[in-house]
Image (cartoon, rainbow, N blue to C red):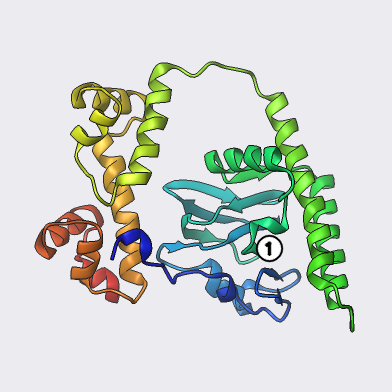
């Protein structure tokens, strides 16, 4: 079985926590918040304080009303603070690094992208491109107030006794949030100074795209350099110049991030994880993992 055919079980839509204010609609939409609740006694704390990477199989949007939460998504670190919005796309690998006890969050989980922006292909692609490059956006207090008001109205409609069109009504409110987000992105892009990316920056981004697609099968610089029609030496120099990190470090970090998620999934042995990541044997995988993490794969899995 190929690795891409094997699902991660770390975080599915149905695994979002029940805070007493968690609502599931037709297994497609989850609304959850901890407004006015201490995180220390809130079931949401188990969700936001996991100590190992997880892979999302759905789209996740988080609005932060106060406090902060520091996360790592696809090797990039973000700090979600007051009036920030975090959008996590399906397939992202995430890890919670730090969270304040006073954090207040509104979380919307969506399993079916067709519920939002389905008829607006151009807008959907623009938003996908934006949130692929960065998951975090800061919005004004007025925009946050409007977003939370829309969330409250959506909850109220879904909670209305005897109402027969819960998902349809929720989709309407989500559509407004979708258009608002597109407006935020448009305004943000308009304010940015237009610049032409250097050839080196373009090569770096192309390299990272290749690594994301092939890290489980290929760890050699010659492979990535060949794909870009460059010599391994030149590509290595470019990556170091642009990112202040060696190309092999980027490849290693993607491999280790996936290895951690697989080990913590509870579905595979150490040997199976090594096989999924195309190591020649479990001994080689163990040495590779320990050199990067500081402990053996088995110790990490059981820790």
- Vertical relation: 44 (above or below) 111: below
Whether residue 295 sits left or right of residue 10 in the image: it is: left
- Vertical relation: 96 (above or below) 195: below
Crowd rating for badge 1 (residues with CA inside 10 Å; few <14, some 14–19, many 20+) = many
Residue 149 at x, y percent in the picture: 86, 59
Whether residue 137 sits left or right of residue 263 in the image: it is: right
> Relative to the observer, which residue lies in front, 144 or 3?
3
> Relative to the observer, which residue lies in front, 227 or 188?
227
Residue in the image at 33% along x and 49% along y:
254
SS for callout 1: strand
State the image quarter where residue 128 is shown: top right
State the image quarter where residue 4 is shown: bottom left
Whether residue 235 sits left or right of residue 102 in the image: it is: left
Residue 288 at x, y percent in the picture: 17, 54
State the image quarter where residue 8 is shown: bottom left
Residue in the image at 32% along x and 28% along y:
239
- Vertical relation: 162 (above or below) 92: below
Question: Label 1 belongs to which residue?
Answer: 108
């Amino acid at each position: 079985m190929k690795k891409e055919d094997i699902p991660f079980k770390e975080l599915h839509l149905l695994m979002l926590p029940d805070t007493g204010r968690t609502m599931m609609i037709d297994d497609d939409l989850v609304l959850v918040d901890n407004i006015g609740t201490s995180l220390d006694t809130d079931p949401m704390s188990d969700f936001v304080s996991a100590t190992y990477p997880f892979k999302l199989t759905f789209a996740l949007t988080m609005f932060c009303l106060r406090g902060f939460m520091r996360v790592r998504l696809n090797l990039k670190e973000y700090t979600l603070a007051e009036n920030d919005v975090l959008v996590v796309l399906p397939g992202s690998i995430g890890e919670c690094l730090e969270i304040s006890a006073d954090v207040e969050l509104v979380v919307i989980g969506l399993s079916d992208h067709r519920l939002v922006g389905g008829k607006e292909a151009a807008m959907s692609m623009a938003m996908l491109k934006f949130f692929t490059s960065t998951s975090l956006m800061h919005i004004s207090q007025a925009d946050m107030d409007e977003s939370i008001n829309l969330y409250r109205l959506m909850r109220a409609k879904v909670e209305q006794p005897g109402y027969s069109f819960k998902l349809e009504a929720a989709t309407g409110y989500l559509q407004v949030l979708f258009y608002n987000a597109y407006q935020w992105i448009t305004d943000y892009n308009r304010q940015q100074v237009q610049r032409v990316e250097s050839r080196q920056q373009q090569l770096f981004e192309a390299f990272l795209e290749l690594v994301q697609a092939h890290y489980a099968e290929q760890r050699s610089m010659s492979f990535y350099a060949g794909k870009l029609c460059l010599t391994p030496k030149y590509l290595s120099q470019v990556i170091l110049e642009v990112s202040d990190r060696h190309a092999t470090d980027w490849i290693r970090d993607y491999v280790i991030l996936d290895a951690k998620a697989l080990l913590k999934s509870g579905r595979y042995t150490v040997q199976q994880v090594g096989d999924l990541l195309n190591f020649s044997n479990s001994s080689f995988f163990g040495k590779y993992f320990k050199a990067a993490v500081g402990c053996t794969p088995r110790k990490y899995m059981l820790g």
